[in-house]
Each structure stands twice: as C-alpha cells, then as structure tokens.
Amino acid sequence: MKKVTLLISLFFANISYAEELIKIGENIFYNKEACVNCHILNAADGGNNQLSIDHVINIVTNGYGVMPAYKDKLTKKEIEAVAIFVSTEGKNWKNKLSSFVQ
C-alpha cells in the first residue's frame, strides 16, 4: 500500500511540476520576453507541423536566422519551460509559429 501511495504522489508531483513549467513558459512567451510579438501564431501549415521540445530548446538557446539566442537571457529552466509551452500548447493553436518552423 505504501508503494502505491508513493507512486500516486510522484505522479501528481510530476503533473504539478509540468503545469508549473507550462505557466512559466506561457509568461515568458506572452510577457517576459514577448516572443508573441514576432511569433504571431500565423502560418500556412494550419498547425500541422508539431515542434518537438528538443527542437524548440535548440532554437531558443542558440537562435536561428534572425531570432537571437536566449542562452544568456533565460535560465535553462526558463528555456525548457518556454519550449514545453510552445510544444504542448502549440498543438491547440489553429496556426503555428511560422518563424519557429525552420
């Protein structure tokens, strides 16, 4: 019984941590770094191109094209959070972040 309780506690702790990261990422995307100003959620693919977390982490960390690198502006946790937000919540956007799709 103790093992089951421990597993359930770990499961909900992970869900809570994931929800926290998504909220942090959302705040970075819309407020702190205002990513939304350039990534206006407007692309021709209609949301069909799903971005992996690793892909977004790489782009946010190192930059790509005209997008600057954020490795000196955001912590690793913040970069992971914004990547999780974009990768997870982006599935719900009708249009993808066109400049993220490289």
Image: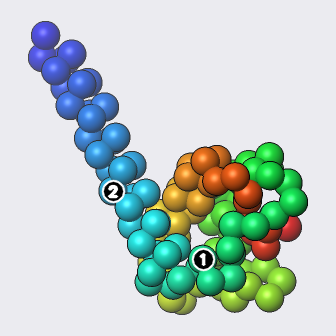
Q: Which mark is residue 1?
A: none
Please say if 93 is above or below 61.
Answer: above
Point 44% across, 83% down: residue: 32
For label 2, the crowd category at 10 Å Cα-Cα, with few meaning under 14, some 14 to 19 and many 20 or more, is few
| Quadrant containing the N terminus in the rendered view | top left
Q: Nearer the viewer, residue 84 or 54?
A: 84
In the image, residue 91 lies at what x, y percent?
A: 64, 47
Coloring applied to the structure: rainbow
The answer, for residue 65, to whether it is visible in the render is: yes
Left or right for 48, reference 22? right
Point 52% across, 73% down: residue: 29
Whole-number angstrom distance, CA of label 1 to CA of label 2 = 20 Å
Point 33% across, 56% down: residue: 20
In the image, residue 41 lies at what x, y percent?
A: 69, 67
The answer, for residue 87, to whether it is visible in the render is: no
Give the residue at the far top of this rendering. Answer: 1
Which of the marked residues, 1 or 2, is nearer the chain's N terminus? 2
Find disc 2 in the rendering and name its residue. 20
Find disc 1 in the rendering and name its residue. 36
In the image, residue 4 lies at what x, y percent?
A: 21, 16
Please say if 40 is above or below 5.
Answer: below
Amino acid on which disc 1 is placed:
Val
- Dot 2: element: helix
| Quadrant containing the C terminus in the rendered view | bottom right
In the image, residue 80 lies at what x, y percent?
A: 51, 63
Please say if 67 is above or below 76.
Answer: below
Amino acid on which disc 2 is placed:
Glu
Give the residue at the far left of this rendering. Answer: 2
| Mark 1 or 2, closer to the camera | 1
- Dot 1: element: helix
Instruction: Please tell me in which quadrant of the rendered image residue 44 appears.
Output: bottom right
